[in-house]
């Protein structure tokens, strides 16, 4: 970190409010030429909002963003781009009918209505940038024919085409293999060595630790730590936010759990999507009445595992349910046998009211039972009674998630699978959802399998935790042992 | 921006010469059908620039066409402006309409914009009916002047106009501007992040599309000698323009011309089967669109990436 030079980007008092939610709270930080800054934070921490404000996609409520002394806060995106800020989006939408070279060339065109030809030399420049980014072999191919990593390279090339002095990279390594991560790191280091100021935005420190010169951690829109990767990883607040240091766990004694019969047992389950392996020999046991959390980052294989258990994807290996090995039952038969999955996408009927959504789920119950079950659900999630007549798409994210869980419970599951219930929820909402899970756990003997990347949410309720990474279970144990034995991967 | 092989250029030149020499061999009826088809081709190509490139869903191409047609027709019939001046007035009216349409387009997208463009056609149609005193209403407006009374001359005018319009639209689509339009049409934020003021580019796309739609509408009026709702404003005309563009191949410009000629010539060839002809042509169009989403041009092997 080089504090002797003047910052290229100086952010001060940056503030963003969405309605009642404060997404970013009076944030100050500097970004220097020739450095790689990692901006990290869990879902909902405000890191993406910060990036979008720098790029002008989102307008700050207050604050300054000085680019070489000029305030760019609130200016239109195209203006900010021309002032020297480039961004690599996580998802790319390349021009389909144009070659890779032409896609890069796009970044070099002037914003002019009257110019019909690229400026002289632009094609050569595009070719040079493409070669620099490792696209030399594929410059004349169409984007659709490229592997994923090359598409990401093309996005990098487009972003630096205009020779920006600041480069923002959103989740630089998402979806890349470790060899590709290595190549990408080298590319991003080269941007830095060319004197650019680089900002990486990611969920956790670990993924960018070796690349970032300096890391800034955000939580609830505020800076909680700043320093080298090591410093931030050792920071108490960061550890608490990511690992739930000091969170109260409620695990029951292992012996007590083991005394219950095994409800679900998966043995060496593998899932393939075409040639790509999403799950590799995963084994897992859930006892009756047990609360099991599966912790893993985006893309680790949680959803694939759940879909295999629910019979939604073909798999290799064996799954036993209630003591008997399962054959080729349909997803519907599996659901009727008592496995109910509450998907991360929630899948509510948005235009139906809250009450109608619940009623639909209770179609198969006798009227008396349906009513009593509904009463119980309303006790569990009082807000759903209040919102009864409201269209479910108008609920807040947290309320929708509660409705999704309530709807799953209406089906009287013997095993409830919750896939990323915290996805996209603001941290304040997590508390409410967590309370509801506590009530569920304390007042019933339900069996739950919870998939989460948010460790602080997954640990407090769990009796046992599995850690999944790149499609493999790499650790399992009790929540109290988690931080010490498996925590580093989640910082 | 890709260069076209010489052999293909030569073939194209031969084809154009044959087209231009058509009046030597063909009768007035065939020339008449083709004349209409050529104006139609410009409608479809203009529409393709807006939808295929800028990504703006315009379900009402006849709003722009109608403005051009009635602008030209009324300034000739009521103000007595000579034909070239009247055509210019029609083009200006259409461009003004196109820019007006761009305003909602910058706020709305997809089906919502589509609905607005549809409503704009209905509004224009109603306005023409209500102000029948100056517009001719449902009967139509006869214009005193025509381009020519010779079917061969009319054919050459239409052919020339189509070729010039098509060339300009094609060059725009293949230019830097066309690439920026495509980028903005796909993802406005990403285009802005590359430094492009997508708003300005989209307004320009609306204006250019409107200019050629309006010009073609105006020419058509002076070919037919009349401006009528059923010929240049009706929603069903707009639907045929869209079908022609999609049938020929979206994002190609030229596809619009091929689709239009195909639709109109097929309609004429099937005229003997009477009422059924429209049905059969629509059915053929449907089958082609379902089976070959890239349109007739997509069937050619030269398309890259195929």
Image (cartoon, rainbow, N blue to C red):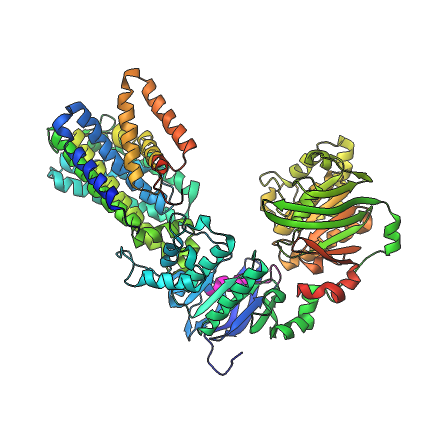
Would you place residue A347 above or below residue A451 in this image? above
Most distant residue in the top direction: B273
Would you place residue A411 above or below residue B172 in this image? above
Q: Residue at x 29, y 30 (%)?
A: B262
Residue A327 x %, y %: 74, 35
Most distant residue in the bottom direction: A4
Indicate the quadrant where residue A341 lies: top right
Indicate the quadrant where residue A468 lies: bottom right
For this rendering, which residue is in front, A125 or A65? A125
Residue A427 x %, y %: 64, 59
- Please, what is the dominant secondary structure of the magenta stretch? helix
Residue A393 horizontal side relative to residue B98, left or right: right
Would you place residue B159 above or below residue A118 in this image? above
Write the start and end of the magenta stretch as one range. Answer: A42-54
Q: Residue at x 79, y 63 (%)?
A: A480
For this rendering, which residue is in front, A254 or A147? A147
Number of numbered tags placed on the structure image: 0
* Residue B71 visible, this orientation: no
Q: Quadrant of the C terminus of chain B?
A: top left
Determine if the magenta segment contains residue B243.
no
Q: Residue at x 40, y 32 (%)?
A: B289
Residue A362 x %, y %: 71, 35
* Residue A49 visible, this orientation: yes
For this rendering, which residue is in front, B3 or B94? B3
Residue A149 x %, y %: 51, 56
Determine if the magenta segment contains residue A47.
yes
Residue A223 horizontal side relative to residue B228, left or right: right
Indicate the quadrant where residue B82 lies: top left
Residue A261 horizontal side relative to residue A75, left or right: right
């Amino acid at each position: 970190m080089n504090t002797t030079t003047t910052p290229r980007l100086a952010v001060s008092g940056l503030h963003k409010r969405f309605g009642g939610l404060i997404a970013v709270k009076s944030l100050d930080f500097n970004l220097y030429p020739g450095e790689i800054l990692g901006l990290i934070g869990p879902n909902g921490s405000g890191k993406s909002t910060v990036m979008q404000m720098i790029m002008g996609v989102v307008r700050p409520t207050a604050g300054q963003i000085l680019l070489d002394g000029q305030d760019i806060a609130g200016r239109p995106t195209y203006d900010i781009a021309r002032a020297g800020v480039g961004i690599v989006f996580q998802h790319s939408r390349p021009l389909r009918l144009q070659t890779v070279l032409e896609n890069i060339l796009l970044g070099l065109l002037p914003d002019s209505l009257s110019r019909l030809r690229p400026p002289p030399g632009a094609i050569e420049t595009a070719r040079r940038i493409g070669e620099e980014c490792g696209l030399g072999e594929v410059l004349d191919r169409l984007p659709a024919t490229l592997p994923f990593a090359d598409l990401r390279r093309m996005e990098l090339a487009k972003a630096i085409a205009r020779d920006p002095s600041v480069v923002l990279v959103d989740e630089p390594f998402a979806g890349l293999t470790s060899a590709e991560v290595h190549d990408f790191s080298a590319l991003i280091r080269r941007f830095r060595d060319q004197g650019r100021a680089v900002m990486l935005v990611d969920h956790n420190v670990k993924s960018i630790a070796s690349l970032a010169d300096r890391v800034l951690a955000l939580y609830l829109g505020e800076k909680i730590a700043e320093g080298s990767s090591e410093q931030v990883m050792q920071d108490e607040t960061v550890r608490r936010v990511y690992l739930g240091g000091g969170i109260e766990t409620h695990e029951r004694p292992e012996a007590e759990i083991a005394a219950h019969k095994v409800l679900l047992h998966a043995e060496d389950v593998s899932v393939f999507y075409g040639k790509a392996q999403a799950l590799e020999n995963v084994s897992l046991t859930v006892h009756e009445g047990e609360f099991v959390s599966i912790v893993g980052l985006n893309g680790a294989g949680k959803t694939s595992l759940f879909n295999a258990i629910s019979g939604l994807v073909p798999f290799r290996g064996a799954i036993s349910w209630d003591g008997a090995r399962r054959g080729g039952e349909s997803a519907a038969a599996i659901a009727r046998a008592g496995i109910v999955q509450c998907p991360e996408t929630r899948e509510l009927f948005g235009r139906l009211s809250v009450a109608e959504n619940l009623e639909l789920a209770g179609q198969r119950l006798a009227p008396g039972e349906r009513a009593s079950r509904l009463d119980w659900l309303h006790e569990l999630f009082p807000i759903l009674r209040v919102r009864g007549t409201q269209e479910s798409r108008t609920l807040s994210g947290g309320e929708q998630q509660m409705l999704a869980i309530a709807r799953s419970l209406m089906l009287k599951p013997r095993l409830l699978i919750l896939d990323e219930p915290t996805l996209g929820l603001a941290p304040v909402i997590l508390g409410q959802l967590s309370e509801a899970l506590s009530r569920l756990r304390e007042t019933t003997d339900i069996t739950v399998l919870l998939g989460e990347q948010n460790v602080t949410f997954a640990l407090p309720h769990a009796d046992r935790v599995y850690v999944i990474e790149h499609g493999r279970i790499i650790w399992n144990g009790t929540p109290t042992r988690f931080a010490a034995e498996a925590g580093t991967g989640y910082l | 921006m890709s260069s076209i092989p010489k052999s293909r250029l030569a073939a194209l030149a031969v084809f154009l010469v044959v087209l231009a020499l058509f009046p030597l061999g063909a009768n007035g009826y065939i020339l008449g059908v083709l004349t209409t088809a050529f104006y139609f081709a410009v409608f479809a190509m203009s529409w393709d620039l807006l939808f295929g490139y800028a990504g703006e869903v315009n379900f009402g191409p006849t709003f722009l066409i109608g403005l051009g047609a009635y602008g030209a027709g009324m300034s000739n019939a009521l103000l007595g402006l000579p034909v070239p001046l009247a055509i210019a007035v029609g083009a200006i009216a259409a461009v003004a309409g196109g820019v007006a349409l761009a305003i909602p387009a910058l706020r709305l997208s997809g089906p919502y914009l589509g609905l607005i463009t549809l409503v704009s056609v209905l509004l224009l149609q109603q306005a023409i009916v209500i102000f029948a005193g100056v517009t001719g209403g449902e009967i139509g407006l006869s214009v005193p002047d025509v381009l020519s009374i010779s079917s061969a001359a009319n054919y050459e005018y239409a052919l020339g106009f189509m070729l010039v319009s098509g060339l300009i639209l094609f060059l725009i689509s293949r230019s830097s501007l066309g690439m920026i339009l495509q980028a903005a049409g796909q993802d406005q934020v990403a285009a802005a992040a590359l430094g492009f003021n997508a708003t300005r580019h989209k307004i320009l796309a609306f204006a250019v599309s409107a200019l050629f739609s309006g010009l073609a509408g105006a020419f058509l009026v002076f070919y037919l000698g009349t401006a009528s709702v059923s010929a240049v404003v009706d929603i069903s005309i707009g639907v045929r323009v869209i079908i022609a563009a999609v049938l020929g191949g979206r994002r190609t410009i030229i596809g619009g011309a091929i689709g239009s000629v195909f639709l109109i010539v097929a309609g004429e060839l099937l005229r003997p089967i009477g009422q059924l002809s429209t049905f059969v042509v629509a059915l053929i169009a449907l089958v082609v669109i379902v089976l070959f989403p890239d349109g007739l041009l997509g069937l050619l092997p030269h398309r890259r990436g195929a």
